[in-house]
């Protein structure tokens, strides 16, 4: 079912197709015009049928009610006089003049070849552009060469710095390995000393004990000797002091037979002999007092 708007379009199309002026045009143009107006093919067919029906009914009505039963003859074509030709010539001349003027003003400059002056100007402009481009290219080449030289110099510096760093790293590694070896040797020496120190102390203690035992034995023998000499010296010279009481010492044969294992033991035995001299003297003095 068609809407009122579509029905109005169909009515307008029927009126358009029923117009005698429109019927003089080809059918394809009329169909294209109706399609441009927005009508569908079904609506166009319906409009054409209604227009044909309306045209046939109008012809029948005209034939029935026309007072003249003969068809109306077309009017003869009017012939042109000189005024029509004059107007046509004036209009044609004006149109032609306008067309020529527009052609010369807008199209001819683009169609004509350029003059020699224009060629020279274009050549000079192109030459100037080429010169500027060449100068710019030379400047770019110079800058590129400078940058390349700077990059090469920087590369050499970086290579030299890298070599120096490598040498320093090698030296550091060598020094570290040497330090590690030295620390290992020192650690081994410390461990050896730590292991040997108790043995040396024990050996030194044994030698000291042996020296002290020998000194005690010698002191006992000297004491017995002094005691055996004391009565005889007291009866002969009661007022004279004992000659041996001034500086007691160890006999030479005892010093020759004493063991000397090392510098430390020698110093220990020497200190032991010097320390043993004092009690010997005190004992002698004590015995002297007893002798008195």
Image (spheres, rainbow, N blue to C red):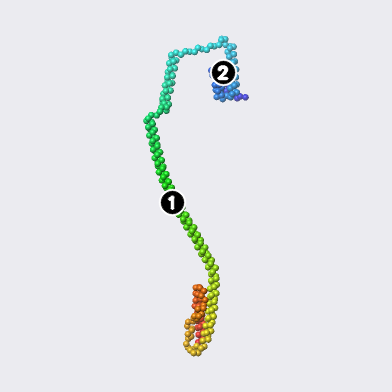
Q: Nearer the viewer, mark 1 or mark 2?
A: 1
Q: Is residue 170 above or below residue 127?
A: below
Q: Which sits in the foreground, 66 or 107?
A: 107
Q: Which mark is residue 34?
A: none
Can you give x and y, in whole percent of width and height, for residue 35 in the image? 56, 24
Q: CA distance from mark 1 to mark 2?
A: 100 Å
Which residue is disc 1 drawn over?
157
Can you give x and y, in whole percent of width and height, for residue 11 in the image? 58, 21
Query: Is residue 29 at all visible to an observer of this figure?
Result: yes
Residue at 54% x, 66% y is 191
Instruction: Tell me which corner region of the image, top left, top right, bottom left or bottom right, holds residue 106.
Output: top left
Residue at 42% x, 47% y is 149
Q: Secondary structure at mark 1?
A: helix
| Image quadrant in which the N terminus is located | top right
Dot 1 crowding, Cα within 10 Å, few <14, some 14–19, many 20+? few
Q: Secondary structure at mark 2?
A: helix
Q: Which sits in the foreground, 37 or 129?
A: 129
- Residue closest to the far bottom: 236
Dot 2 crowding, Cα within 10 Å, few <14, some 14–19, many 20+? many
Which residue is disc 2 drawn over?
18
Verify CB contact (< 8 Å) between mark 1 and mark 2.
no
Q: Is residue 139 left or right of residue 272?
A: left
Q: Which sits in the foreground, 15 or 127?
A: 127
Instruction: Tell me which corner region of the image, top left, top right, bottom left or bottom right, holds residue 71.
Output: top right
Q: Is residue 42 left or right of residue 124?
A: right
Query: Is residue 12 at all visible to an observer of this figure?
Result: no
Q: Is residue 19 above or below residue 250?
A: above
Q: Earlier in the sequence, mark 1 or mark 2?
A: 2
Q: Is residue 17 above or below residue 128?
A: above
Can you give x and y, in whole percent of width and height, for residue 120 in the image? 37, 32
Can you give x and y, in whole percent of width and height, for residue 25 in the image? 54, 19
């Amino acid at each position: 079912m068609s809407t009122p708007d579509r029905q109005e379009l169909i009515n307008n199309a029927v009126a358009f197709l029923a117009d005698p002026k429109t019927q003089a045009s080809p059918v394809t143009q009329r169909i294209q015009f109706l399609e441009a107006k927005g009508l569908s093919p079904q609506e166009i067919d319906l409009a054409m049928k209604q227009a044909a029906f309306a045209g046939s009914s109008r012809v029948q009505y005209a034939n029935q009610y026309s007072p003249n039963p003969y068809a109306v003859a077309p009017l003869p074509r009017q012939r042109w006089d000189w005024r029509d030709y004059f107007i046509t010539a004036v209009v044609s001349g004006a149109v032609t003049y306008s067309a020529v003027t527009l052609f010369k003003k807008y199209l001819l400059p683009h169609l004509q070849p350029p003059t020699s002056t224009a060629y020279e100007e274009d050549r000079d402009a192109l030459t100037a552009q080429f010169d500027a481009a060449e100068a710019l290219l030379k400047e770019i080449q110079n800058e590129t060469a400078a940058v390349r030289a700077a990059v090469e110099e920087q590369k050499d510096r970086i290579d030299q710095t890298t070599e120096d760093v490598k040498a320093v790293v090698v030296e550091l590694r060598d020094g570290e390995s040497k330090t590690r070896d030295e620390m290992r040797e020192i650690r081994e020496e410390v461990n050896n000393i730590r292991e040997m120190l108790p043995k040396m102390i024990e050996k030194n203690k044994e030698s000291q004990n042996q020296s002290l035992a020998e000194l005690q034995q010698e002191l006992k023998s000297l004491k017995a000797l002094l005691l055996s000499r004391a009565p005889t010296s007291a009866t002969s010279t009661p007022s004279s002091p004992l000659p041996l009481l001034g500086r007691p010492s160890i006999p030479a044969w005892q010093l020759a037979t004493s063991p000397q294992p090392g510098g430390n033991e020698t110093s220990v035995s020497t200190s032991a002999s010097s320390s043993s001299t004092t009690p010997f003297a005190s004992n002698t003095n004590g015995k002297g007092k007893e002798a008195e």
